[in-house]
Image (cartoon, grey):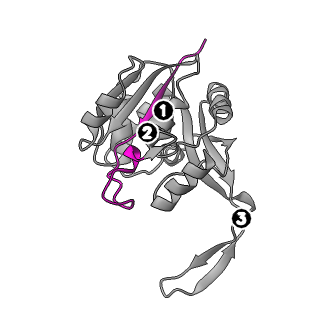
Amino acid sequence: MDKFSVIITAGGTSSRYGSKNKLLEEINGKTVLEETVSKFTDFEEIDEIIIPANVSIIEQIKEIFTSPLIKITEGGDTRQGSVYNALKLVKNDYVLIHDGARPLIRRDIIAATISATIDKGAVSVMTKTTDTIKEVDSTGKIVKTIDRTKLYNTQTPQGFKTDLIRKAHSKLQGGNYTDDSSMLEELGKPVYIVNGSYTNIKITTKSDLDFAKLYI
C-alpha cells in the first residue's frame, strides 16, 4: 500500500483573527488544530503527521499532541517556509498538505485526494467559483466582468509526490507562495483538481469560528 505523510500548517500568527491564536480556540470540545488533525488520523494510508508550528505556540502544541504518529517542528517566517521545513522530515513517497485552520474538511474528500494523488501526482482540492467576479482598477472603477466558468477557489488538502513538491520548494525557496500547487504551476508542472466542499472554510475571523461551531 502507498503510504502518505500529512503536513498540517500551524505557523501563522493569526494577525487577522485577534490577540489569541485561532488554532488554539475551542471547537467541538477541542482546539481548532486538534479538530483538523483528527480528520486525518483514521486512514491506513497515513502513518505520519507533521505540524510546522509558530514558535509562540509550539510548546502548547507539544503538550496537546503526544501520539507517536504526530511530529512537531518549528515553522518558518512564511507559510512556504513552514511547509519546506516540514517537507525535509517527510519519510513517505506521497504527502498531503493541509491548512491547520480548515477543521471542516470531510473525510470523503481526503480519501478522494489520496486516490487522485496516487493517480495524478499533484492535485488540489477546489470548488467552482459561484460569485460574479469583477476586475477593478486603482480608482475603484469596474473594468470588466471576468468569465467565471473556468474559475475555481483553491482549498486544501493538496496532494503531491513528495519528490516533486520537495524539489519545487527547493528551487523556489525564499519566495512567498501562499499555496503549494502554485509553485508547480510556476515551474510548468501539471496540477489537477479534486472537487471540494463549500463548507471547507479557512478560519480567518471570529465569524468563521462561529460558523464552524454551528456546522459541527
Quick one: which residue is furthest to the right in this view? 149
- Residue 20: assigned label: none
Q: Nearer the viewer, residue 51 or 163?
A: 51
Picture layout, residue 10 above or below residue 2:
below
Magenta segment, principal secondary structure?
loop
> Which residue is pictured at 48% across the width and 32% down the height?
37
In space, the residues marked 2 and 3 are separated at their CA atoms by 33 Å
> Which residue is pictured at 68% across the width and 32% down the height?
108
Tag 2 near tag 1, CB within 8 Å: yes
Q: Provide the residue designation for mark 2.
A: 33
In space, the residues marked 2 and 1 are separated at their CA atoms by 6 Å
> Which residue is pictured at 64% across the width and 50% down the height?
199
* Left or right of 112 in this view: 122: left
Question: Disc 3 vs disc 1: which is toward the camera?
Answer: 1
Tag 2 near tag 3, CB within 8 Å: no
Q: Provide the residue designation for mark 3.
A: 148
Q: Which amino acid does label 3 sit on?
A: Arg
Q: What element carries label 1?
A: helix
The stretch in magenta equals: 1-25
Rate crowding at label 3 as few (under 14), some (14 to 19) or many (20 or more) other CA atoms within 10 Å: some
Q: Is mark 3 on a helix, strand or loop?
A: helix
Q: Provide the residue designation for mark 1.
A: 37
The image quadrant where one finds the C terminus is top right
